Image: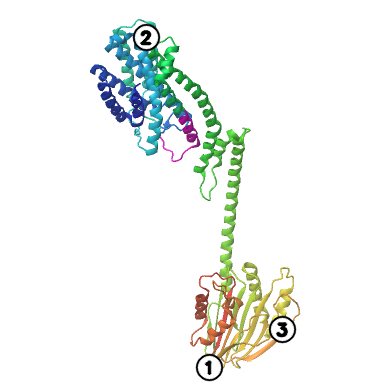
């Protein structure tokens, strides 16, 4: 047994010309130590280099149906069959060429040349298979495979002819060897022709694209189990073929030479291996074709998936459609994938329509926000008698709060604040309608209770949504400093008297829009200092502990605020400090009136 010959194939396959040179140098030392003639050793290593390098060339070769490959991997049946083919081709070459060398350099052994060739062949293929599986696994595990670069040399069809001639020459040589009486000239000619074709073929340029996959496939796991089982069978066969006791027993039973017993046992074990391999490869090929390939096809969807984009269904449907007709789980999966693609594309299309509609609504809301803001006073009224100002911030794009102030004549000032039920667009519409209606009504009647009465009746008509409005309306006379007002369910204002703010005691009234013909009450006071009117969004502002700003905190702020300036911005800062980053869900509106001293 010479198991080291298996290193020739695996080193050439994994490391290319560098591995071939290294293994040949190692074999050279082994053969010299074993006492072979230098002429045989040198010629053997030249041939061995060609055979070792041939394995590398075959693996990375490009053929009609093969335009890309990977580094040596036994991860599918195609690669395993290619690996077996390389072992078989190189094994035949190795045994035939070395048989010729022994014929020429050891004439005394000519009678047993066929036996030598068979032993070399069995030795080569078994040891190559074992070392090949182990070597390829280790090289992939630690990633030290030598991969070639694509050659710039032009590819010629001549190399395909040479490959064919190499196989034909081997077959013709075997036929001649077993049908004719050989002499030195025939053997030398055979050897020269084979080696010449081999080394010319080795100059073939590598044009096959080398691809790397970053994932481990299912077929690779299946193939690993299969190869381990095969490896165990081969090792078991080699152990049996090397057992002296078993060889002795077989020698006693069979009428053949002891050396032939070893060969017979090795051939028998290889036949058993073939009996295992052929159906196993066929089953694995069927699994690949019926299961693995469809799954790999389904995995192609990954490169078509992009966030928030439709899947390019045309190419994928072409891939999946060939599996739809299968009455298996693969057919069901294929149909499900096609439906999923269609559903996804419809969903994306709907999302785009929704996004377009959303953008349209957003644009319209922005316009509505500007319209609503423009309907509110933008500048304070500040004269020698009084200063009035306001602030409103909707919780959404538009809100249901509003404030208004304007001079009715040279003596009187109208001040209004309202809060519509609900939020957003419906509340904003109600607020704007109310604001416009007040401006129309106040032109004909300056009685606050009468205005609220008429307004309430109009809002109550056809109010199918049961929306309502709280409203406080006052008219201030700068000459008499008299403030007449009426309340429709709104929060009581803050009024400053005797240098202190307090809540104005007044009739509550009811909200507008719920009950017709309600008689509101007009009240009057003398306003000599300051008035603050607000909506409940101010007092209901809450912080992260869900505490409300509240009426008492609002009252304390104004009593503590000792400043002649407008208090609106300082109040808003105080509310912001209280609420922090907590989102607010109600509109905030404030109206401030300050009467100046004569």
Name the residue that disc number 1 marks.
597
Name the residue that disc number 2 marks.
177
Picture coordinates of residue 426, whole percent (x, y): 65, 68
Q: Is residue 158 left or right of residue 384?
A: left
Residue at 29%, 24% (x, y): give it: 27
Q: Mark 3 Cα within 10 Å, few/some/many (few <14, many 20+)?
A: many
- Decide which of 518, 223 is in the foreground and name it: 223
Residue 506 visible within the image: yes
Q: Are the residues tagged 1 and 3 within 8 Å (C-beta)?
A: no
Q: Is residue 89 above or below residue 321?
A: above
Residue range corresponding to the magenta coloring: 210-229
Quadrant (top left, top right, bottom left, bottom right) of the N terminus: top left
The mark closer to the camera, 2 or 3, is 2
Magenta-span inclusion, residue 222? yes
Picture coordinates of residue 40, whole percent (x, y): 26, 17
Residue at 34%, 10% (x, y): give it: 112
């Amino acid at each position: 047994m010479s198991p080291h010959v298996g290193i020739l194939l695996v080193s050439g396959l994994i490391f290319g010309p560098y591995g071939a040179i290294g293994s040949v140098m190692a074999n050279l030392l082994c053969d010299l130590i074993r006492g072979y003639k230098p002429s045989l050793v040198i010629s053997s290593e030249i041939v061995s280099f060609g055979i070792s390098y041939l394995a590398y060339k075959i693996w990375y070769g490009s053929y009609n149906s093969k335009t890309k490959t990977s580094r040596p991997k036994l991860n599918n049946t195609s690669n395993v069959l290619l690996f077996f083919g390389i072992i078989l081709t190189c094994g035949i070459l190795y045994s035939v060429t070395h048989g010729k060398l022994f014929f020429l350099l050891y004439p005394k052994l000519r009678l047993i040349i066929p036996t030598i060739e068979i032993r070399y062949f069995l030795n080569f293929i078994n040891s190559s298979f074992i070392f090949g599986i182990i070597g390829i696994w280790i090289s992939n595990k630690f990633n030290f495979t030598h991969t070639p670069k694509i050659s710039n040399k032009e590819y010629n069809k001549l190399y395909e002819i040479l490959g064919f001639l190499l196989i034909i020459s081997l077959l013709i040589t075997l036929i001649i060897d077993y049908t004719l009486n050989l002499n030195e000239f025939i053997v030398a000619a055979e050897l020269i022709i084979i080696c010449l074709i081999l080394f010319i073929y080795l100059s073939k340029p590598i044009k096959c694209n080398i691809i790397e996959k970053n994932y481990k496939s299912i077929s690779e796991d299946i193939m690993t189990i299969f190869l381990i089982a095969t490896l165990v069978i081969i090792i078991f066969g080699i152990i049996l073929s090397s057992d002296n006791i078993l060889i002795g027993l077989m020698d006693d039973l069979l009428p053949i030479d002891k050396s032939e017993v070893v060969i017979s046992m090795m051939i028998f074990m290889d036949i058993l291996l073939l009996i295992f391999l052929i159906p196993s490869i066929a089953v694995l090929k069927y699994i690949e074709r019926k299961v693995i390939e469809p799954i790999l096809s389904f995995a192609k969807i990954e490169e078509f998936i992009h966030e928030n984009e439709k899947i390019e269904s045309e190419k994928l449907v072409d891939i999946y459609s060939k599996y739809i007709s299968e009455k298996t789980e693969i057919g069901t999966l294929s149909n499900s994938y096609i439906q999923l693609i269609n559903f996804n594309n419809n969903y994306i299309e709907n999302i785009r329509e929704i996004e377009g509609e959303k953008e349209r609504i957003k644009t319209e809301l922005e316009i509505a926000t500007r319209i609503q803001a423009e309907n509110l006073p933008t500048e304070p009224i500040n004269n020698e008698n009084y200063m009035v100002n306001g602030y409103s911030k909707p919780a959404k794009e538009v809100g249901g709060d509003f404030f208004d102030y304007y001079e009715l004549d040279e003596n009187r000032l109208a001040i209004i604040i309202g809060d519509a039920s609900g939020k957003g667009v419906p509340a904003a519409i109600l607020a704007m309608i109310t604001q416009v209606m007040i401006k129309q009504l106040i032109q004909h009647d300056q009685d606050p209770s009468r205005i609220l009465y008429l307004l309430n009746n109009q809002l109550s008509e056809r109010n199918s949504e049961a929306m309502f409005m709280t409203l406080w309306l006052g008219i201030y006379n700068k000459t008499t400093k008299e403030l007449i007002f009426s309340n429709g369910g709104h929060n009581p204002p803050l009024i400053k008297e005797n240098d202190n703010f307090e809540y104005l005691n007044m009739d509550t009234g009811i909200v507008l829009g719920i009950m017709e013909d309600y008689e509101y009450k007009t009240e009057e006071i003398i306003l000599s200092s300051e008035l603050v009117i607000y909506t409940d969004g101010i007092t209901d502002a809450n912080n992260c502990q869900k505490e409300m700003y509240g009426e008492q905190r609002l009252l304390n702020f104004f009593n503590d605020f000792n400043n002649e300036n407008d208090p609106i911005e300082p109040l808003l800062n105080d509310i912001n400090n209280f609420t922090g980053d907590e989102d607010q869900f109600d509109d905030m509106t404030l109206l401030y009136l300050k009467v100046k001293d004569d």
